[in-house]
Image: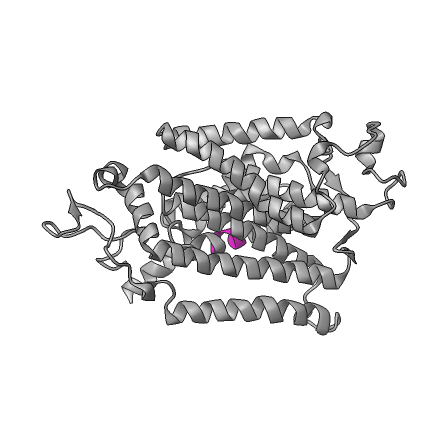
Amino acid sequence: MTPTQSAFGAPPMAPKGSPRDLGGVASVPAKPDPRRVLRVAHWAGVGTALLAVAVGLPVFNLVVPETSALHLSGFYVSLIGKILCYAICALAIDLIWGYAGILSLGHGLFFALGGYTMGMYLMRQIGREGQYRADLPDFMVFLNWKEFPWHWALSDSFIAQALLVVLVPGLLAFIFGFFAFRSRIKGVYFSIITQALTFAAMLLFFRNETGFGGNNGFTDFKRILGIPIATPQMRVALAVLSGLVLIAFFVMSRAIVASKFGRVLQAIRDAETRVMFSGYDPVAYKLVIWTLSAAMCAVAGALYVPQVGIINPSEMSPAAGIEMAIWAAVGGRATLIGPIIGAFFVNGAKSFFTAAFPEFWLYFLGALFIAVTLFLPHGIIGLFRRKGVER
């Protein structure tokens, strides 16, 4: 760690007596350096990630023969696709927690809303191939529904549902954030309220009369955009798309945190009251980044559902939001790349332990989290930074 960098990548403390000094807390630079968005090494990493996602996944799964040791099976393609979606969520959490000091434990709600919105379109794509051979989804026929409810009106249009994936969770986040931030609710109280919101939504979606499949949710998807969904080519295409979206969100996030807007967010995180005295409105800044973070999670949910083939209210459980925060903490918050690493590390370990030690995997994961807390307080990325300083 260099003298000009705080523990989590926050802006340095302004020198006493400098024009930016606000009682020892750094305020916003007058003109952010655009070169800080992505350095040469960062661009090289982005290029490598693009090659791995856009070329590596298709080649090793579709081109390399199954008899080869280099072949990537369909199981691992689906697993990588799922973790890429989780990584988007971890990145979204880092934007609000690491750079704005807003800890949300309810982002599982936005993830699930994006998944349900895409799931509605996928259910309409089933057509008359369901168990009851009806125009309505099977669960509606079972419940003796005669027509689609009003909120399914646009569900047969991919473009409309793709827009709603962002608009519905974004609008909910905006309304919730407006009242919460205007009331100056923050810290642990804000975290508890986000969990309460998520839990209330989960109970609502469990009800059959809401038109979302009750506790079973949506499943048995057949196709997307008229293309069969259960094919190796579609499986790879969805995983590649998830990777490309993650890379795009990462570049966008780097641009945000390196801009003046990002500097204001970090100043709000460190000393919100002093930022207010400087003439900035913290509510507006927090509301924008909060809504953007929710929309990112919703996009991740929309990409996740066709890959796993199911969406139900369990995705809204309070545990889901806590897990997202854990990914960011394990990887190293306020670093952007750290939470992505944390999502891959935690979920990769979870996948391994559940297969190798099904009866003890929870103990392994608990030990993992304790070890990271005790020995890596700045996350996995902090370990690499510390080694760089020691050299």
Residue 298, horizontal then vertical, whole percent: 57, 45
Front in this rendered view, residue 19 or 15: 19
Residue furthest to the left in view is 17
Q: Please state, as top left, top right, bottom left or bottom right, where the C terminus lies in the image.
A: bottom left
Secondary structure mostly seen in magenta is: helix
Q: Residue 101: tell me if it is visible.
A: no
Q: Residue 263: tell me if it is visible.
A: yes
Q: Is residue 344 magenta?
A: yes
Residue 15, horizontal then vertical, whole percent: 14, 52
Q: Residue at x 22, y 39 (%)?
A: 274
Residue 201, horizontal then vertical, whole percent: 59, 29
Front in this rendered view, residue 378 or 292: 292
Front in this rendered view, residue 11 or 182: 182
- Please, is residue 153 above or below residue 7 in the view? above
Residue 43, horizontal then vertical, whole percent: 43, 69
Q: Please state, as top left, top right, bottom left or bottom right, where the N terminus lies in the image.
A: bottom left
- Please, is residue 3 above or below residue 269 in the view? below
Q: Is residue 362 left or right of residue 214?
A: left
Q: Residue at x 84, y 27 (%)?
A: 144
Span of residues in magenta: 341-346
Q: Is residue 213 magenta?
A: no
Q: Quadrant of residue 216?
A: top right
Q: Residue at x 32, y 39 (%)?
A: 282
